[in-house]
Amino acid sequence: MPSNKELSAALDIEGTVPIHSVQLDAMVVLKIVKHCRESIPATVTGQLMGLDVNGVLEVTHSFPMPKNNQDSEDDASNYQVQMMRCLREVNVDDNSVGWYQSTNMGNFMNQSLIEHQFEFQQALSKSVLIIHDVARSSMGNINLRALRLTPAFMKLYKEKKFTTEALTKAKLTFSNIFEELPITIRNTALLTALLYELETADESVEVSTSHLTTYKSTASTPANKSVLAPSFDVLDLSLDPYVAKNLENLMDTIDDHHQEQGNYAYWQRSVERENKKKAAYLLNRKTENARRAQSGQAPLANEDVDAMFKIPAEPSRLDHLLISGQIDNYCKQINEFAGPTLGKLFAVGELQK
């Protein structure tokens, strides 16, 4: 029997062990995928329930949140409290460990998400955000990312001070706004046994699949179909729609980045203009005092020059960070999926020579 001290260390009751990975139950993954796919193209969110053990955040249950409405902001909170009470009554984990959100084409870097995750990490230091990209998952592999705001970003966001000097001092860029945690998917023993039976190669073992409609539909595929059947799909030279949409989003985001750069350049010109006015005023005042001193007159009274020439405050650089991070996401996705298409185009170009 483990001692109370060992149990306390494993469950990290005092909250001293930082989380280093996230473990999702398979049922939680299916719930997230189902909720996000049914609501596309709208963005949906939900709550994650579980417990952290030895630095591993185990997510054992989840439930969707109602769509945002304009009636009352307390509706979502009341719904969450009622759901957690119902889960407690049926002996299901009711400890909130984070939330999930759907996204499309990797477009999730915005201030609304940052604010929501900041509030979560302020209330629950070990909360996590799960991002599910529906469009990218449709390419063949499920796309799930576990993200947390870094301590440096949390500190700056709490101070609401996103100036160039503060960002440079904190060494904060778009690449370290979030820290990504590895995700593992856990199957129950019963589910693992079922999957093993479905994949068994022993034809003498008879497995009843009458209750599995998906399995019945796939099992009706002819077994004698040749693996080497001719296919001309690889010769299709059309640009992948996923890559094309990413390029469109990238161009729109670059326009937003250019606008942010224009706003910052306007602020720099305003500061330079005010500094020139201030320098010219001080020079004229110095010349006037020198002339009055030569003529035996008293110098002019000192005035608050800073109050006369107010330097405009530097605009927040948070939008610039988020837009830069979004551009980086689009570029990575294009780089990952554009390879096969570009390879076919170059091959055809060489054949036409």
Image (cartoon, helix red, strand yellow):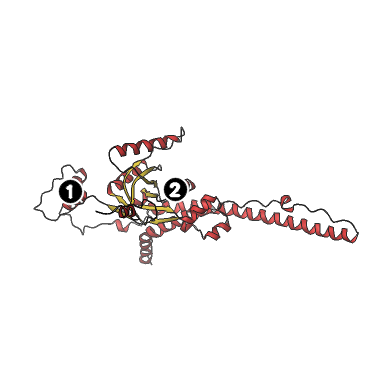
Please identify the quadrant where the C terminus is shown: bottom left
Q: CA distance from mark 1 to mark 2?
A: 44 Å
Residue 109 in percent (x, y) is at 46, 50
Relative side of 262 to 88, left or right: right
In the image, 228: left or right of 71? left
> Dot 2: few (<14), some (14–19), or many (≥20) neighbours within 10 Å?
many
Q: Nearer the viewer, residue 55 or 265?
A: 55
Q: Is residue 248 left or right of residue 82?
A: right
Tell me if residue 272 can be seen. yes
Residue 253 drawn at (x, y percent): 49, 52
Q: Residues within 10 Å of mark 1 (few under 14, many from 20)?
A: few
Q: Would residue 250 be found to the left or right of residue 141 on screen?
A: right
Rendered location of residue 294, percent (x, y): 89, 61
Q: Earlier in the sequence, mark 1 or mark 2?
A: 2
Res. 90 image quadrant: top left
Seen in the picture, residue 65 relative to 228 is either above or below; the reply is above
- Element class at badge 1: helix
Residue 256 in view in this figure: no
The one of 181 and 142 positioned closer to us in this rendering: 181
Mark 1 or 2: in front is 2
Q: Nearer the viewer, residue 13 or 107?
A: 13
Q: Which mark is residue 117?
A: 2
| Residue 177, numbered circle | none
Rendered location of residue 290, percent (x, y): 85, 61
- Is residue 104 or residue 339 the one in the foreground? 104
Find out whether the residues at labels 1 and 2 contact each other: C-beta distance under 8 Å: no
Question: Pointer 1: what residue?
Answer: 219
Give the answer, above or below, for where 258 lies relative to 351: above
**Outermost residue, left side:** 204
- Residue type, numbered disc 1: Ala
Residue type at mark 2 is: Gln
